[in-house]
Amino acid sequence: MKANSLVEEELSKAGESSPVSPLVVQLDKFRIMSDTDVPPEEFLLRMFGKPCFPRRDLSTVTGLEKCGKTFFTSMLMACCAEKNVLELERIREEPLKVMWYDTEQSRQSTKGILADRVVRLARTKEEDPDLFSQESDMEGNFYVFNVRSCSYQERMDYLVAGIEAYKPDMVIIDNVSDLLPSVNDTDASIQVIGQLMQLASEYNCNITVVIHVNRSGEKRSLRGWLGTEILHKAYEVYYCEQIENTDTFSVEQTLTRKYRIPEKLFYRVNDDGLPEITVKPEYQPRDRNGQFRSNRAEAYQINADKADSFNQKYIIHNDGNVRQPWEWDLRLLFGDVLGDIPSMGRETLQNEVMARSGIREAKYFDKVFRLAMDQRVVQTTMDRNGRIVAMLIPS
């Protein structure tokens, strides 16, 4: 027999004084039970066959300046019209409505990207004449706005009005930092992200926000307190970069709540100005003296530190592997240090890891720490005091 809620029980006790306050009555409406009727997760796209960009939630695209973020969002827009774009696939057969809210670029740049890139990427294939047979029909599902000249408050007000009026399936905000005066304003950051989450839920859409990473270039260190709030609330994060000394760009999923996409998307821009699939370039970086650097993980490049000098609890021996005879058990090492602690300051973490592992050089710890971030063992964020802290990523 289904159990009644606390509120229902209390209200059913006629003649008895009830301790239930009006707030608890309201709270009970938000209660989740095993038989609560909740809509299933619905995703708009697939990337390498994995569902992504869910309705009623936030997605994030990040990277340094000029690293391909707008190219990637252009692909997302085009895929809302065309079934398949590079490694992206629209899940439902019918085209999706997409709203691109450009706060950064000139009106000329916005128009150029729409006309010369998005529309051309999304142009219907000859064998599929029924969907978007004419470009004018296609653009009917694109709602593109350039609000660079508006104030912060106007941008937010117009955004809300546009979502209410056009009810898009996907909203792309490039750049979300321009919806508030400062990315380090804690209260404004919480308010903006809270309002975007409410809009996504109320209008059953995906809202994808673009934000830069900090100038340190760390993949999981988004700019300001706004970036910290996004990391806490976003369903997934995609990192864009241009590979050093090449014309190749990549897109990597760095965080997700559910469907992990291990593959990286590699593309280059062809002579027509459109992205096309390519492979990871065989580029070997050089040091300051022009000598080739190893492509192996940096944590294995210091020969002076032999495996037997470290705490063997955290060493994995790969017998018979000449190229990599041993490696760190990073999940065990950082898990032992962080444990159930939500976050830890960088200096404290360094001291604890070095003490447990037997690492003696701070520079070597830096390499091990970067390797742990690359392997999605830990991530960095910023606390309320503006300090960089580290967090353990659940396995």
Image (cartoon, helix red, strand yellow):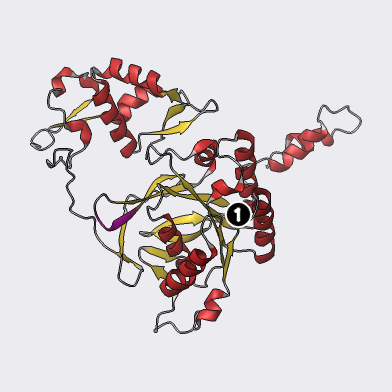
Query: Is residue 371 shown to the viewer in this render?
Result: yes
- Badge 1: few (under 14), some or many (20 or more) residues near its Cα, within 10 Å? few
> Is residue 33 or residue 347 the one in the foreground?
347
Mark 1 element type = loop
Residue lying at the far right in this picture: please name it.
15
For residue 127, above or below residue 63? below
Q: In the rendered structure, does residue 63 fall within the stretch colored magenta?
A: no
> Is residue 26 or residue 96 the one in the foreground?
96
Asked which quadrant contains residue 276, the reply is bottom left
Residue 107, horizontal then vertical, whole percent: 54, 64
> Is residue 328 or residue 189 the one in the foreground?
189
> Is residue 43 or residue 221 the one in the foreground?
221
| Residue with the mark numbered 1 | 39
Residue 200, horizontal then vertical, whole percent: 61, 53
Query: Is residue 1 rendered to the left or right of residue 87?
Result: right
The residue at 49%/83% (across/down) is 133
The residue at 41%/59% (across/down) is 72
For residue 222, above or below residue 130? above
Query: Is residue 29 rendered to the left or right of residue 217?
Result: right
The residue at 44%/58% (across/down) is 70
- The type of residue carrying mark 1 is Pro
Over which residues does the magenta segment extend? Answer: 246-250
For the C terminus, which image quadrant? top left
Residue 337, horizontal then vertical, whole percent: 37, 21
Asked which quadrant contains residue 273, the reply is bottom left
